[in-house]
Image: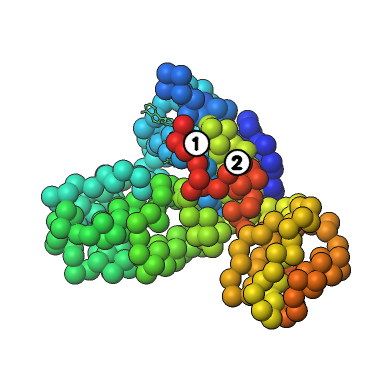
């Protein structure tokens, strides 16, 4: 996937390519509210794509449209080169933001039921249900009602429900929200495994550190428009800024104040990170920094996904107001 800023109407690469999910020119309004505005992007098999955007940007609407739960005003969605209909959706898995489990049904029975809904026979469905419960550390809860499980464990069941029929495309709406660190690790490992087995994975999240860790590609949406797509590695390497990390013998001084284009990202225990223009001269920066104190560490790195997000959208995800 090649980086593309300001994409609005066409997928990033391989238009018409036969194996991917291809969302084209998708528009949807609710009265005066424009939820999606000519949104186009692609999700590739074997890769995990992070779907990012401020609250109310249109992520859930786009995901729901893939599953026919929202009827777009315009645009189309194709999978493996053909239109997406009920037969294709049998091979898709969806983990919705609003959890869609039956609270009173036992966990094991519920998963078998979801497998059956996707065309898996009873014996194979039961086997897959038990395998997923084991994989997610829930074997002992197979006979518990969903409502008796904690929030995090219900979320694990919701994940299993999305995967129990071995889907080729998996779409997860904020799968990490509310999970403890162990559950996050399990979720990340499961998603990586799915992609390595060839599934196309699309997930939305506001936790950019997790997205950076788990995803290869990103699609950034703002006010219904796709504003940036690409491979995270490429976007970080081609970003006009770099991160400069400086370690000082004592507390980090404010040497950067008044230097054009140098912005402090964080400072802790004498180590500070700054966003600096890619073209800034290392020697000039080192000279300026050393005027403030003795330097024990000085290194450049690629900017974090947060910096790319802020550039694309204009604000950090947790500082965005719902429109
Ligand atoms: P979040 O990150 O907060 O989950 P999102 O990016 O998923 O947000 P959507 O839920 O797709 O955003 O909403 C996009 C816009 O469409 C918002 O302004 C929302 O209020 C509006 N919207 C979504 N669904 C409906 C609906 N059924 N009726 C009216 N407006 C809606």
Direction from residue 175 to residue 229 in the image, left or right: right
Please tell me the numbered disc located at residue 57.
1
Above or below, comparing residue 162 to residue 82 in the picture: below
Residue 311, horizontal then vertical, whole percent: 65, 45
10 relative position to 141: left or right: right
Q: Indicate which quadrant contains ligand 1.
A: top left
Camera sees residue 234: no
Residue at horizontal 66 percent and vertical 36 percent from the top: 7
Q: Residue 95 versus residue 193: which sits nearer the camera? A: 95
Q: Residues within 10 Å of mark 1 (few under 14, many from 20)?
A: many
On residue 313, the disc is 2
Camera sees residue 247: yes
* Label total for image: 2
When the figure is inspected, residue 261 is found, relative to residue 68, above or below; the finding is below
Say which residue appears at 18% left-offset and 65% top-offset.
141
Return the disc, 1 or 2, that comes first in the chain's sequence.
Answer: 1
Relative image position of residue 277 (x, y in whole percent): 78, 55
At which x and y percent is residue 57?
Answer: 50, 36
* Quarter of image, res 56: top left
Q: Nearer the viewer, residue 181 or 255?
A: 255
- Kindly identify the residue that appears in the image at 68 percent across and 52 percent down: 235
Mark 1 to mark 2 CA distance (whole Å): 10 Å
Task: Indicate the quadrant where residue 185 lies.
Answer: bottom left
Residue 191: x percent and y percent?
45, 60
Instruction: Using a 10 Å C-alpha cutoff, classify the residue at mark 2 as few (fewer than 14 neighbours), some (14 to 19) or many (20 or more).
Output: many
Q: Is mark 1 within 8 Å of ligand 1?
A: yes
The color scheme shown is: rainbow
Determine the residue positioned at 20% across, 52% down.
Answer: 110
Q: Secondary structure at mark 1?
A: loop
Callouts 1 and 2 close, C-beta under 8 Å: yes
Foreground: 251 or 218? 251
Q: Determine the secondary structure under disc 2.
A: helix
């Amino acid at each position: 996937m090649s980086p593309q800023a300001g994409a609005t109407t066409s997928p990033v690469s391989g238009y018409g390519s036969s194996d991917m999910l291809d969302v084209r020119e998708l528009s949807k309004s609710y009265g005066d509210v424009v939820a999606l505005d000519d949104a186009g992007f692609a999700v590739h098999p074997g890769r995990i794509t992070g779907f990012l955007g401020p609250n109310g940007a249109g992520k859930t609407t786009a995901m729901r449209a893939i599953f026919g739960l929202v009827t777009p005003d315009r645009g189309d969605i194709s999978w493996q080169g053909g239109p997406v209909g009920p037969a294709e959706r049998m091979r898709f898995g969806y983990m919705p933001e609003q959890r869609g489990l039956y609270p009173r049904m036992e966990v094991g029975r519920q998963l078998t039921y979801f497998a059956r809904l996707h065309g898996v026979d009873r014996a194979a469905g039961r086997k897959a249900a038990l395998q997923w419960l084991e994989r997610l550390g829930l074997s002992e809860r197979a006979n518990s009602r969903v409502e008796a499980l904690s929030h995090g464990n219900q979320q694990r069941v919701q994940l299993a429900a999305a995967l129990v029929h071995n889907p080729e495309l998996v779409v997860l709406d904020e799968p990490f929200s509310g999970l403890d660190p162990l559950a996050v690790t399990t979720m990340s490992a499961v998603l990586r495994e799915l992609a390595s087995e060839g599934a196309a994975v699309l997930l939305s999240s506001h936790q950019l550190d997790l997205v950076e860790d788990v995803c290869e590609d990103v699609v950034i949406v703002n006010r219904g428009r796709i504003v940036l797509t690409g491979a995270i590695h490429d976007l970080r390497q081609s970003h006009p800024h770099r991160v400069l990390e400086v370690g000082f013998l004592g507390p980090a001084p404010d040497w950067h104040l008044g230097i054009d284009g140098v912005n402090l990202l964080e400072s802790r225990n004498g180590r500070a990170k700054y966003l600096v223009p890619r073209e800034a001269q290392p020697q000039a920066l080192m000279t300026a920094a050393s005027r403030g104190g003795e330097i024990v560490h000085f290194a450049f790195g690629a900017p974090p996904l947060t910096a790319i997000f802020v550039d694309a959208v204009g604000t950090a995800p947790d500082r965005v107001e719902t429109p």
